Image: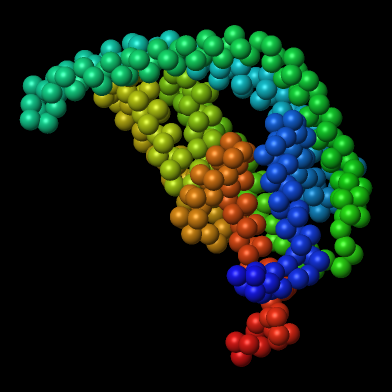
Amino acid sequence: MLEVFKKWYHRYLAEEEAVLLLVLLVGSVLLLITIGDILAPLLASVVLAYLMQGLSGQLERHGVPSWLGVSLAYLVFVGVFFGVTLGLLPLVWRQLVALASDLPRYIDQGKQLLVVLPDRYPGIVSREQIGTLVAAAQAEAASVGQVLVTRSIASLPGLLSVMVYMILIPILVFFFLRDRELILNWLSSFLPEERPLLRRIWGEMNQQFANYSRGKVLEIIIVGGVSYFCFVWLELRYAALLALLVGLSVIIPYIGAALVTIPVVMVSFFQWGFTNEFYVLCIVYLVVQALDGNVLVPLLFSEAVNLHPVAIILAILFFGGIWGLWGVFFAIPLATLIKAIIYAWPSRVGESPTGTSAQDTVE
């Protein structure tokens, strides 16, 4: 057993870079798990600054001076940040409360539709089953209302923290954008000067993160904005809430669009029934989803993510369970990072205990 461990250690951890990379990975995970909540403003600021760096870089490549590109990117961030926190989120919260108050009425409408099923299909559905289903739905609606009231009361002491974050995050994003090179050089001073393995992994990770995160943010904004315009044009209730759900659904591949279709169709059905407005809404929604999948995604993402669908779903479940929404958002690039580490690690330390390389052994 000890000999097996020695061979494994010599193959994967015999060099300084491999040990350093392992320490960085384990340390980062432990840091996020233990004090991730405390570092939440800092981590959010890093992510937001990284996203805005893409806009600043694009401006610089078009001949805009560095200081002007950073200033314009920061102004765009400030406008979007305060527009979302002061405009969109309160509107979404009001519509969510309104939806919770309307749930009992929607359940009664659904009950009227379900009570005829036992008469039409007595061998499949019974009145007891319909009664149990309606009772469960009413209980869930009551619990949703209680949760909203409890969250509203419990969130009052946290308003001070929210105000602090609204001031702290823009300040941190500004310094991360302005002093990006200085901060990166300072962090690099703790690493070995010769680090080809780390450079290779960082290059691939940076490319994947940039292509995915910045493209995904644009996709959320475009899909959510177009959906909101269509819902308002069709006079659908809770337009901002449903459009936000549609925009965020693009974060979860394969199942996000299917899940968000349920509330969109149900709200439109309870509002209009099987009328022309309902069918028009369904057609418009399907057109938006089709344009997103077949036009917008190929335009925004310059490189396809070479991951199996099962790996993507597992990454979403794993990282989402650890870090919530941020984990779901970065699940695909994090899975790509793990894949890059797995493939790059043996290529750097591919030497066997006898001194011959793994490639020579195969040959």
Residue 177 visible at all: yes
Quadrant in the rendering for residue 94: top right
Q: In this picture, is 4 found above or below 113? A: below
- Please say if 353 is above or below 90: below
- The colour style of the image is rainbow
- Is 155 situated left or right of 105 in this image? right
> Could you tell me if residue 40 is visible in this image?
no
Name the image quarter holding residue 45: top right
Q: Percent from the top left, x then y, of residue 277?
A: 34, 24
> Compared with residue 235, is residue 78 higher up or lower down, i.e. above or below?
below
Is residue 291 left or right of 275 when viewed as pictured? right
Image quadrant of residue 18? bottom right
What is the x, y in percent for residue 191?
86, 58
Q: Say how many tags the image has.
A: 0
The quarter of the picture where the C terminus appears is: bottom right
Q: Residue at x 88, y 46 (%)?
A: 183
Which residue corresponds to the image point at 81% horizontal and 35% vertical from the top-left? 173
Q: Residue extending furthest bottom?
A: 363
Residue at (46% x, 55% y) in the render? 310
Q: Residue at x 69, y 46 (%)?
A: 29
Height in image: 269 above or below 300?
A: above
Which residue lies most toward the front here? 2
Residue 362, percent across and down? 60, 87
Q: Nearer the viewer, residue 270 or 63?
A: 270
Give the image location of residue 28, x and y in percent: 73, 47
Give the quarter of the figure containing the N terminus: bottom right
